[in-house]
Amino acid sequence: MVAQDLEYAELYTVDKSVAVDYFVSSMGFAVVAESTADGKDTALLRLGSVQLLVTAGDATQEFLNSHGDGIADIALACDDVGATADAAAAVGARVDNSVPERPVISGFGGPVHTLLPAQPRSEGRLPDGRSWTARSPAPGRPDGHITMLDHVAICVGGGTLDSWADFYEDAFGFVRYSSEHVEAGKTGMDSIVVRSRSDRVTFTLVAPAAATVPGQLDAFLDRNSGPGVQHLAFGVEDIVPAVREARARGVEFLRAPAAYYDMLGDRLGATPAEIATLRSVDVLADRDEWGELLQLFTRSPYERNTLFYEFIERRGARGFGSANIRALFEAVERDRLAAG
């Protein structure tokens, strides 16, 4: 009764064509299938091992009215779907068993988890539960650097972080991997990383820190009308060209302050040439006991300014880098304050 894989993430959006174009033209995803049924008009996008469903239509309106464009479903492939649903129900989750082979678990905020049976991923296999029409990838599609979905960041309310970490342990068999406390000025963030025993699903749970003034996470919870997916982190093979190409195709990334790179040589032992390269694309660098970690956040491309994305390159690193967590948090906070 454990989650083995993240089958797909489903984005509900007010404008499907614009949302699909963002992933296809700017990041290199391909539309491989489409489905229209039950008030949902869906495109299935793939790149590397990542599967994204982009959905519009009448059945999405309640979610969109409450939360704006955002991740509505994080589908999990489980070794025993029925037992996993029972475990989730036992710890207080609402379970929709109207389709017993694909139960839907309601957890934090608006998003749900559709549970699917674990099975080998193949190029021709499409997600269960919809009638798909296969599409040929468009010719001339830009090559994408994205290889995988590294992690999903979920923002929950202050004071609830431990209870949600417990929920994922008890309902889906996840284990706690790490925790962090970060402060920037008078605001702060607490986080707990939970990971499946297969190491193929990672959720970073974040919440406003206690005894700090309202900041970016409080603003997210307000704009999103409660907890939700804050960002999806895409793993890339080589982050520098990935960022340069995505930026050239219209993706907006956050900027790092010059002082960050002034200290990078002493902190990581990076050469002046390496620092200059990272500075030129605003990529952040850190290290843990296993290796190096390079990261950068996008700005949200959506009107409500909630969901955004991350590029992350792991050079052996398994964690998230304490210095990077602080730098990324500060970058988002600066961007929030600059936007007023």
Image (cartoon, rainbow, N blue to C red):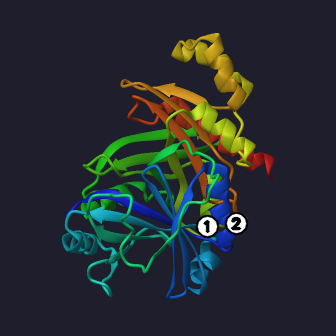
Element under label 2?
helix
Q: Amino acid at mark 2?
A: Val
Between disc 2 and disc 1, the foreground one is 2
| Foreground of the two, 211 or 17 | 17
Looking at the picture, does residue 279 appear above or below residue 133?
above
State the mark number for residue 224. Answer: 1
Q: Is residue 209 visible?
A: no
Q: Residue at x 47, y 53 (%)?
A: 152
| Foreground of the two, 60 or 206 | 60
Q: Is residue 63 visible?
A: yes
Q: Amino acid at mark 1?
A: Asn
- Residue 296, horizontal then vertical, whole percent: 60, 39
Quarter occupied by residue 143: top right
Q: Give the crowd class for mark 1: few <14, some 14-19, many >=20 residues within 10 Å.
A: many
Q: Residue at x 68, y 36 (%)?
A: 244
State the mark number for residue 100. Answer: none
Q: Mark 2 sits on what residue? A: 18
- Residue 160, horizontal then vertical, whole percent: 43, 59
Element under label 1?
loop
- Residue 102, horizontal then vertical, whole percent: 31, 77
Q: Give the crowd class for mark 2: few <14, some 14-19, many >=20 residues within 10 Å.
A: few
Mark 2 vs mark 1: which is more N-terminal?
2
Q: How many marks?
A: 2
| Foreground of the two, 201 or 251 | 251
Q: Specify the quadrant that holds the N terminus.
A: bottom left
- Residue 127, horizontal then vertical, whole percent: 38, 69
Mark 2 touching mark 1, by CB under 8 A?
A: no
In the shown orientation, is residue 290 left or right of residue 62? left
In the shown orientation, is residue 127 left or right of residue 339? left
In the shown orientation, is residue 130 left or right of residue 268? left
